[in-house]
Image (cartoon, rainbow, N blue to C red):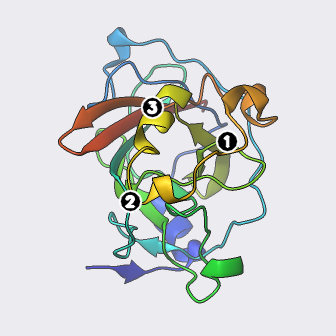
Amino acid sequence: MVERISRSRLLARAGGLLAGAAAFAATRTGPAPAAAAVGCVLTPEMTEGPYYISGEKLRRNITEGRPGTQLDLRLAVVDASTCRPIKGAIVDIWHADAAGVYSGFGAGASSRTFMRGVQRTDAKGLAQFRTVYPGWYQGRTVHIHVKVYVGGNDVHTGQLFFSDTLTDAVYKRAPYNRRPSRDVRNAQDMIYAKGGRQSTLTIRRTGSGYVAAITMGVRR
């Protein structure tokens, strides 16, 4: 069931946890790693960008039937000091569809919701989304935007990235191959240069799609 929830209600429900923000690359694609198995590395904040829309839907599947290679996101939120998972954090994501279009803007102006959604983290600190591999648009490498809220505070604004090798492989398939010759790769992207390595998703193949994971560490 899809629930439309205002940001104020989401933050009110998040409750009780205070944190600073950051992220580090996960070493596996499963649920949030145990504290003993990882080191928590803070990552730089990144720009929110011009395509953010507040009041997104609380839901796991954000595709709204739009085409593209299936991408299951597993985004974990942990305490950066202890690596312990944080339950009840709000994870808010948005990205372009396979054609490089954002809902609410330009060619996507007729809808304000596709490829946008919010999830609360579970007891393992994990928020999961089903989406499609993002398309590219002029001037940027391929990415997903993310915000994290803990205890009513916006504690992290970042972007998640993909390896160029994987993107090249995905873009050989439909519908991505209708738009060849993307113009910016990771090394040329000014935002990626500010912390993209630490914000690159760990990805494994599953059937015809992919599972992508990262753990976002927040400092209390």
On the image, numbered disc 2 is attached to which residue? 68
Instruction: Answer yes or no: is residue 105 visible.
Output: no
Amino acid at dot 2: Gly
Taking the spot 65% from the left edge, 37% from the top edge, the residue there is 21
Kindly identify the residue that appears in the image at 51 percent across and 52 percent down.
16
- The residue indicated by pointer 3 is 166
Q: Looking at the rendering, in which quadrant would you find the N terminus?
A: bottom left
Alpha-carbon neighbours of circle 1 within 10 Å: few (<14), some, or many (≥20)?
Answer: many
Image position, residue 3 (x, y; %): 37, 80
Left/right placement of residue 188 relative to residue 150 reads: right
Sequence-first tag of 3 and 2: 2
User: Does 94 sit above or below residue 36?
Assistant: below
Q: Real-space Cα distance between discs 1 and 2?
A: 17 Å
Q: Residue 213 occupies which quadrant of the picture?
A: top left
Indicate the secondary structure of the residue bearing disc 3. Answer: helix
Residue sitting farthest toward the right: 190
Q: Position of residue 52 (x, y in %)?
A: 69, 66
Q: Is residue 100 visible?
A: yes
Q: Residue at point 48% right, 53% down?
A: 177
User: Which is more toward the observer, 160 or 77?
Assistant: 160
Q: Secondary structure at mark 2?
A: loop
Judging by the rendered image, the residue that carries numbered circle 1 is: 141
* Residue 62 or residue 166, whichever sits in front: 166
Query: Residue 220 sits in which quadrant?
Result: top right
Q: Residue furthest bottom?
A: 110
Q: Is residue 132 above or below residue 13?
A: above
CA gap, disc 3 and disc 2? 14 Å
Q: Amino acid at mark 3?
A: Leu
Around disc 2, counting alpha carbons within 10 Å, would you say few (fewer than 14), some (14 to 19), or many (20 or more)?
many
